[in-house]
Amino acid sequence: MASVSEIITRPRERVHAVKWIKNNLFSSWFNTLLTVLSSALMYTILSQLFIWIFTIANWRVIAVNLRLFMVGTYPLEQIWRLWLCVAIGTTLLGLSWGIWPHVVSRVAMVYGTALLLLALAPFGVTTRIWLAGCGALVFVGMLVGRRIPDAGRWVALTWLVFLPLMLILMRGFGTFLPVVQTRQWGGLQLTLVLAITGIALSFPLGVLLAIGRRSPLPAISLCCTLYIELIRAVPLITVLFMFQIMLPLFIPGGESFDRIVRAIVAFTLFTAAYIAENVRGGLQAIPRGQFEAARALGLNPFLTMSFIILPQALRIVIPANVGQFISLFKDTSLVVIAALLDLLGIGRSVLAQSEFLGLQTEVLLFVAAVYWIFTFSMSHVSKRLEQTIGGGNR
Amino acid sequence: MSEQAISPLPTRPPFWRDVRILAILGQVAFVLIIAVVAGMLYANVTSGMQRLGIVGGFDFMNQTAGFDIGVRPIPYSPSDTYWRAFRVGVINTLLVSILGIVLATLLGLLIGIAQLSSNWLVARLAQSYVVIFRHVPVLVQLFFWYQAVFLRLPRIQNAIELPGPIYLSNKGLIMVGLTATPSTSWWFGFIFIGVLGAVMIWYWLKRRQERTGQQAPRFLISLLVVATTTIIGWLVLATPPLELSIPERRGLNYRGGFELTPEYAALLVGLVIYTAAFIAEIVRAGIQGVAKGQKEAARALGLSASQSLRLVILPQALRIIIPPTTSQYLNLAKNSSLAIAIGYPDLFSVSRTIMNQTAQTVPMIGLIMFSYLIISLITSLFMNLYNRSVRLVER
C-alpha cells in the first residue's frame, strides 16, 4: 500500500488574480450585475455598522454592567470560585487541544489568545491576572496534552467529573466555601450552568428513551413513543412554564424547589425527547447483523446494547446531537419569560434602569454577540468532529 | 464428549429465567409504576386544586373574559367569553405561522441557492447570513426587532412615507389594503372554478404528453385559465368584489388601510429571518446531496442550465429537503409562542392571561398543549402528503 506521502496530489492550479476575479465575479452580465448589487449592499451595511459602532453607540452601558452580564449578583469576595471553574475549564480545553488537535485546535487557540488579549484591557488587577492565567493554561495544557496522546479517555472522564464539581464550587458548602444561593447566580454564568447541566442530564435520558421506543415490549415502547411525540409537539415555553407554575400543584411542597432546578428539569425533559429521536435514527442505521452477531456470541440484550450497538449508533448521531445541544444553549434564553436573570435577563434588567433607557441596540447586540461566540464555537467543533470520525473506521 | 452436551436442551427453563414470562412481568411492573406515579400526581393536583378552591372542567371558559386583545382578526370585545378570546389567540397564532412559513420558505430558498452561487461575493454574503442568524437565540432576535427596530421608528406624526403609500412609524406599518364587498364571496367562487379547471387541463395535457409525446406549455395554459375566469368574474359581477382602502391621516391615527402592529411585524420578521437561515442550510445540503453525475449527465443530454436545475436537480433535491424542512415549519409554529415576550396576543399569551384571571392552570395547560398538538399534526400531515408525491417511485 502506498503511504500518504507517495500518493500524488492533484497539482494546485495557479490562478492569476485578475483571472480569478473575472471567473468568480464578472463571468457574465448577470454575474456582473450581482457583484455590483451585492457590493453596494455590503458597503451600505458595513459602513453604517462601523459608523454606528465607533461614533454613535454608547458602550458605557456594557462597560459599567460587565460584571452583571458575566456573573449576575454573585458576591464579589467569592468570585474566585468562578474563576477557578474557568481555569479548570481552560486547562481541560488545552489538554483536549493537545490530544485531539484536529477537533479543537482552532477554538482552543482563539479562546486562549482572546483571554490573553483581554488581560491587556483596563480591568482590575485581579481580573487581569486571572484572565492571563486562564489564557496561559490553555497553551500549557496543550503542551502537556501533546506529551500524553493516549490520555484521551482520562481527559474525557475529567470533563465529566468537572461538571458536578463546577456546580459544587459555585454553590459552596460548609464553612470554608460559604453557600451562594442560586438566586444570586446570573448572567453568562447562569446561562452556562443551565446549558451544561441540561446537556449532561438530557443525553442519558434521551438514550434510554430511544432504546425504550425500539423495545420489542409493547407497553414500554408505547409509553416512550407517547412521551417523545407529545413533548416534541409542544413549544418549549409551555413545558418550562408548566414546571415553573405547576410543580407546586403536582408535588406537595413543590414551592420549595429551586427555580433554577425547575428550569433545568424542564430543559432536560424537553431536550431528551429530541435526543431520543436522533439516537433512534442511529440505532436504525445499525445493520441487523450486528445484533445477530452479538447474540451468537452469547451476549445478553443489555451487553449487546452497551458494548456493540450503542458505541456505533452514538458515533453516527454525534453531529445531530451537537446540533440539539446548540439549540438547547440558545433556548436557555427562554428562562427570561420565567423571570430568571440569565444573560438575556440581565440585559433586560439593565435596560430597565432609568440611566440606560434607549440603549436597546447596544445591549441586545452585545448579548447576541456573546451567545454567538459560544454557539458558533460549538458548531465549529461539531463540524471538525464530523470530519474526523467521518473518514474511515468503517 | 460428555452426555449432557449432546442431549437436547431442557424443554423449558424455570419461569424466573424464562424470557417470555420475564418480559410480561417486566412490562406489568413498568405500567404499574407509571400508573402509581400518575395516580399520585393526579391526587396531588386535585387536592391542590381543592386547597386553592378551584373547580375543574371547562365551564369557566363560558364566563365573560373582561380583558381586551390588541390584535383582533375576528370581532371581539371584553364582554365576550373566554372561549372567544382563546379563539382570537389561536387565529393570531395561525396568522403569524402561516405567513411566516411562506416567507421563510421563499427567503430560505433564495439564500440557500445563493450560497451555491458561482459568484464568489454572493455566495459569501449568503453564507454570512446563515452563520450570523442561525447562531443567535431567536428570543434575542425578537427583542432586537421589536425594541431596537420597530419601536424606535419615528412617531406617527413624522411617519416615514414610502411609495405605495406605506407609512412606517412606531405604531406599526400602514399600507393600502383591500376591503371585501358583498360580492367578494361570489368572486372567490369564480376563482375556485378557474383553479379547478386549470388543474383538470394540466392533468389532461400531462396524460396527452405521456401517451402521444405531444408537448404543450402546461403551466402557461393553466395560468391563463385561472386568469381568465378571475377577470370574467370581476367583469360579470355588478359591484367590484374588492375595494381599495387608502389610509388617511386623522389627527394622531390613520383611518382605513391595512395595518400591521409593531408586535406582529417584529414577530414575523424575527421568525422569518431566523427560520430562513435554517431552511437555507437545508436547501444547500439538499442540492449538494444530488450526485454530481446527475448534473453532468443533464448537461451532456443538452439541457440548459435552468432546465437541468428545474428538471433534474431540484426534483431529486426535494426528496432530501422536505423532511427536515417540515420540522423547521413545526419549529416556526412552536416558536411563535415567544410572542408573549413582545406582547403579541397569540394562543399562548391569551391563555396566560386567562390563567392569571381564573387560576385554572391545569385545564388551560391541557388546552394549550392540545392546540399545538393539532397544529403540529396538521402541518406534518400536509408535508407528508407532499413528501409522498415527490418520493422516489420504485418498481
Image (cartoon, rainbow, N blue to C red):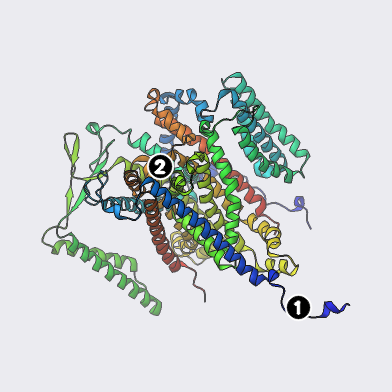
Query: Is residue A16 in view from this perspective?
Result: no
On the rendered image, what quadrant is the C terminus of chain A found in?
bottom right
Per the image, label 1 sits on a secondary structure element best described as loop
Host chain of mark 1: B
Q: Position of residue A261 (x, y in %)?
A: 53, 41
Task: Name the residue beneath numbered marker 1.
Answer: B10
For image coordinates 55% across by 42% down, the residue present is: A195
Circle 2 — which element?
A: helix
The answer to which image quadrant residue B219 occupies is bottom left
| Quadrant in the picture for the N terminus of chain A | bottom right
- Give the alpha-carbon distance from disc 2 to disc 1, as whole Å: 82 Å
Q: Residues within 10 Å of mark 2 (few under 14, many from 20)?
A: few
Q: Is residue B11 left or right of residue B166?
A: right
Discs 2 and 1 carry the same chain letter? no
Q: Where on the picture, by quarter, is residue B306?
A: bottom left
Residue A73 seen in render: yes
Q: Position of residue A35 (x, y in %)?
A: 44, 43
Q: Would you name the residue on which mark 2 appears? A: A37
The amino acid sitting under disc 1 is Pro
Q: Quadrant of residue B250?
A: top left
Using the image, tell me which numbered label, if any, was put on residue A196.
none
Foreground tag (2 vs 1): 1
In the foreground, A53 or A371: A371
Amino acid type, callout 2: Leu
Residue B240: image location, x then y, percent: 14, 57
Locate residue B381, reporting x and y percent: 41, 64
Q: Residue at x 36, y 52 (%)?
A: B97
Q: Chain of mark 2?
A: A
